[in-house]
Image: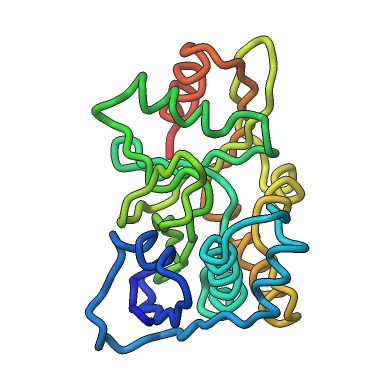
């Protein structure tokens, strides 16, 4: 089996073994004869790695493991073409791309849903878990992908990324703008860094570029709707 899909504007041919991936990528399919920027296939060793060492190591279906392995291979290749994988949620709010980043379990998905519920006419979730960020003519765009976490929040679309927000949990809601220097270490914990040296160095360089292109915020929030209003009013209250 094989199919071609569009991921962050790249045409990716996936030589898949299991039907899971074809279903997963259904919203992103291109004609089968579309010229491919990347061709990805998965070996038995790749599946074993995901089973034993991946972020969700354990007993999973072959199709699920193949999905993880394919995305890892793509994420390892694209930094050399000015793109990288971000672990976070990205929304478009009134035409402005906003990324929410947090350690696992802190509540980035909950905060995303608060924005969506409080500003339903303005907010579209581009990807709720693992968007791709691609620089085009020096501008960072966040692209939706089929890898969108258990909630499956994603669209086949993109938004120009203007704001990066780091979320921490707290009793009182607050939002303050921080410097790229303050954000550098937290951001590195939320991007995929390839094992190959050249691609790793490029991913780190792209992360640095992102912080120079975007405004960066620290959001301290609880899980009440007021948390979204506090963050929204800060992000949209200042000059771009």
Q: Position of residue 178 (x, y in %)?
A: 66, 36
Q: For the image shown, how many numbered marks are present on the structure?
A: 0
Residue in front for this viewpoint, 170 or 73 = 73
Residue at position x 63%, y 60% in the image = 207
Q: Quadrant of residue 143?
A: bottom left
Q: Is residue 170 left or right of residue 126?
A: right
Residue at position x 71%, y 74% in the image = 201
Q: Quadrant of residue 12?
A: bottom left
Viewer can see residue 34 = yes
Quarter of the image where the N terminus is located:
bottom left
Q: Quadrant of residue 23?
A: bottom left
Q: Is residue 54 left or right of residue 85?
A: right
Q: Position of residue 170 (x, y in %)?
A: 69, 16
Q: Is residue 127 left or right of residue 94?
A: right
Residue at position x 51%, y 23% in the image = 231
- In the image, residue 150 sits, relative to residue 17, either above or below, namely above
Viewer can see residue 163 = no
Quarter of the image where the C terminus is located:
top left
Q: Position of residue 203 (x, y in %)?
A: 64, 69
Residue in front for this viewpoint, 170 or 66 = 66
Residue at position x 57%, y 66% in the image = 62
Which color scheme did the rendering employ for the protein? rainbow
Q: Position of residue 46 (x, y in %)?
A: 66, 76
């Amino acid at each position: 089996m094989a199919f071609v899909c569009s991921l962050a504007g790249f045409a990716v041919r996936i030589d898949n073994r299991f039907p899971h991936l074809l279903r997963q990528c259904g919203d992103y399919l291109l004609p089968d004869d579309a010229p491919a920027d990347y061709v990805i296939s998965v070996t038995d060793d790749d599946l074993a790695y995901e089973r034993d060492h991946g972020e969700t190591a354990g007993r999973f279906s072959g199709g699920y493991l193949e999905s993880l392995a394919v995305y890892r291979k793509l994420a390892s290749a694209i930094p050399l073409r000015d793109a990288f994988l971000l672990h976070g949620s990205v929304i478009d709010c009134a035409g402005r791309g906003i990324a929410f980043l947090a350690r696992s379990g802190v509540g980035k998905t909950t905060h995303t849903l608060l924005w969506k519920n409080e500003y339903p006419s303005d907010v579209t979730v581009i990807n709720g878990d693992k968007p791709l960020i691609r620089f085009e003519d020096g501008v960072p765009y966040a692209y939706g992908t089929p890898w969108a976490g258990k909630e499956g929040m994603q669209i086949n679309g993109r938004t120009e990324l203007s704001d990066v927000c780091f979320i921490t949990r707290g009793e009182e809601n607050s939002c303050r703008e921080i410097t790229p220097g303050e954000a550098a270490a937290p951001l590195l914990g939320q991007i995929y860094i390839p094992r190959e040296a050249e691609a790793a160095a490029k991913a780190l360089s792209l992360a640095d570029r992102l912080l120079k292109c975007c405004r960066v915020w620290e959001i301290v929030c609880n899980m009440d709707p007021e948390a979204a209003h506090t963050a929204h009013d800060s992000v949209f209250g200042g000059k771009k």
